[in-house]
Image: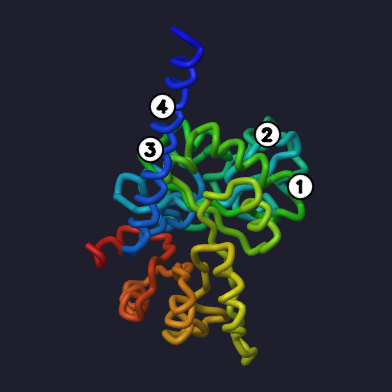
């Protein structure tokens, strides 16, 4: 084959792959036009959060996204764990990023659930390990969508670049399989620089006091994110309003609300026009939306 023909063949392959990537990303954005059921740390109301049983249960139920918090171990591995400290949901103590992956995976992240929720206890939960993001991707691959949070990025330097590398390795961004969220604007802007096509969501916390909402900030968020993740309640008070949802959507932002577990609240937010909900009980939400 001549040099010209080899170059032409290479260009055709690149064009085909790029077209497929564009189609996948366009499809993801089209899918986000409908209501999204987001399994908060998996089906974490039924099984220990961020463990394989919680993720498998949510996946089997047909949720739109599996949500996980991502941190770095001391030796640079991406792990799925919510708290900065280990003690609430494991038999360890200290900060996640002070331990190597080998040490973290010696911990038991299931026994606490049996003790806290004896009516939902299962002997198979005892001894469940902390999962790496790699293990999650290897288990579910492109059969699932993932909603990942960069957790405590200030304590996890290099988290964003490690995450983008992992997403590229498993073709999650180009395959339209992932959204990344964070409370840190800086973390999201770093991700935007590293991967221009990565869908981003800015997490917000609405306080229970009378602090006025800065609705103008929504326009700034829309410059780098496709949506906001916002709390429904704070200190047992409903803090999210229908007006906030409408204002965000006027700025072109999707509104995904966390963490909503009662069907009455779910229905109210659906009626208000929320674009999706995070829930520990995805089967309850699926019952409504289906």
Residue 172 shows in the view: yes
Helix, strand or loop for disc 2: helix
CA distance for labels 4 and 2: 42 Å
Would you name the residue on which mark 4 appears? 12
- List x then y, in percent, for residue 282: 35, 59
Identified at 65% across, 50% down, the residue is 193
Residue 20 is tagged as 3
Would you name the residue on which mark 2 appears? 101
- Going from the N terminus, do you reach mark 3 or mark 1 first? 3
225 relative to 159 in the view: left or right:
left
- List x then y, in percent, for residue 227: 50, 66
CA distance for labels 4 and 3: 12 Å
Above or below 107: residue 205? below
Would you name the residue on which mark 1 appears? 157
72 relative to 234 in the view: left or right:
right
Asked whether the residues under the numbered discs 4 and 1 touch, taking CB atoms below 8 Å apart as contact, a structural biologist would say: no
Identified at 55% across, 69% down, the residue is 222
Identified at 52% across, 81% down, the residue is 236
Asked whether the residues under the numbered discs 4 and 3 touch, taking CB atoms below 8 Å apart as contact, a structural biologist would say: no
Front label number (4 vs 3):
4
Q: In what quadrant of the picture does the C terminus appear? A: bottom left
Quadrant in which residue 21 is drawn = top left
Front label number (4 vs 2):
4
Identified at 55% across, 36% down, the residue is 168
């Amino acid at each position: 084959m001549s040099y010209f023909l080899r170059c032409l063949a290479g260009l055709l392959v690149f064009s085909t792959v790029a077209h497929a990537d564009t189609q996948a990303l366009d499809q993801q954005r089209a899918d986000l036009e409908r209501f999204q059921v987001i399994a908060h740390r998996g089906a974490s109301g039924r099984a220990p959060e961020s463990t394989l049983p919680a993720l498998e249960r949510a996946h089997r139920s047909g949720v739109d996204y599996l949500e996980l918090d991502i941190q770095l171990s001391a030796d640079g591995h991406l792990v799925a764990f919510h708290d900065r400290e280990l003690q609430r949901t494991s038999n360890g103590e200290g900060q996640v990023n002070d331990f190597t992956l080998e040490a973290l995976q010696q911990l038991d992240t299931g026994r606490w659930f049996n003790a806290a929720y004896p009516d939902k206890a299962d002997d198979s939960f005892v001894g469940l390990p902390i999962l790496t993001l790699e293990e999650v991707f290897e288990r579910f691959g492109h059969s699932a969508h993932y909603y990942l949070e960069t957790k405590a990025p200030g304590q996890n330097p290099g988290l964003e670049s490690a995450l983008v590398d992992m997403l590229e390795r498993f073709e999650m961004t180009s395959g339209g399989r992932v959204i990344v969220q964070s409370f840190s604007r800086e973390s999201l802007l770093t991700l935007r620089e590293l991967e221009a096509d990565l869908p981003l969501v800015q997490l917000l916390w609405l306080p229970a006091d009378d602090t006025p909402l800065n609705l103008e900030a929504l326009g700034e968020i829309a410059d780098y994110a496709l949506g906001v993740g916002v709390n429904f309640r704070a200190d047992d008070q409903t803090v999210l309003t229908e007006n906030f949802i409408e204002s965000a959507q006027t700025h072109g932002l999707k509104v995904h609300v966390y963490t909503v577990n009662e069907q009455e609240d779910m229905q109210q937010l659906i009626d208000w026009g929320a674009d999706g909900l995070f829930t520990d009980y995805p089967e309850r939400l699926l019952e409504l939306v289906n």
